[in-house]
Amino acid sequence: QVQLVESGGGLVQAGGSLRLSCAASGSIFSISAMGWYCQAPGKQRELVAAITTTGTTNYADSVKGRFTISRDNAKNTVYLQMNSLKPEDTAVYYCNALMFGAINYWGQGTQVTVSS
């Protein structure tokens, strides 16, 4: 099993920045990729960004050029740097760990609110 603890959400004005962190513990050597998903009220959870163990990244079109996902293997932590935030980025952001074998683990979620 893997435990994921998120931090870094909050309230920010449009155009501002936030950095989300996700610390993983447990069976971390079985993780094939980690990512961030967001879920706005009344909408489905959707991928924001992901990064594999080899460092390959993938971004939703809506955040390309504004968000950056990175990882610190020594700290077993994944980060999401969010710049030029827009009100439509407002959502609960969830950290995800995809295991070899296609099992998913989720963090508890952190609220990001962008005011106009």
Image (cartoon, helix red, strand yellow):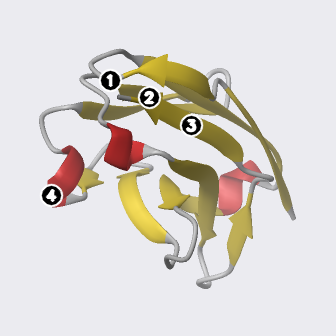
Task: Kindly indicate whether the residue at mark 4 contacts the one at mark 3 (C-beta within 8 angstroms).
Answer: no
Other residues around mark 2 within 10 Å, as few (<14) / some (14–19) / many (≥20):
some
Residue 75 in sight from this viewpoint: yes
- At numbered mark 1, what does the secondary structure look like: helix, strand or loop? loop
Coordinates of residue 92 in the picture (x, y in percent)? 61, 51
Residue 34 in sight from this viewpoint: no
Q: Residue at x 15, y 58 (%)?
A: 61
The residue that mark 1 highlights is 14
Q: Name the mark on residue 112.
A: 3
Q: Is residue 5 above or below residue 70?
A: below
- At numbered mark 3, what does the secondary structure look like: helix, strand or loop? strand
Q: Which of marks 3 and 4 is in front?
A: 3
Q: Name the mark on residue 115.
A: 2
Q: Name the mark on residue 61.
A: 4
Other residues around mark 3 within 10 Å, as few (<14) / some (14–19) / many (≥20):
many
Q: Which of pointers 2 and 4 lies earlier in the amino acid sequence?
A: 4
- Going by the numbered disc 4, the residue's amino acid type is Asp
Q: Residue at x 59, y 83 (%)?
A: 102
| Relative depth, front residue between 91 and 36 | 91
| Relative depth, front residue between 34 and 13 | 13
Task: Kindly indicate whether the residue at mark 1 contacts the one at mark 2 (C-beta within 8 angstroms).
Answer: yes
Q: Which of pointers 3 and 1 lies earlier in the amino acid sequence?
A: 1
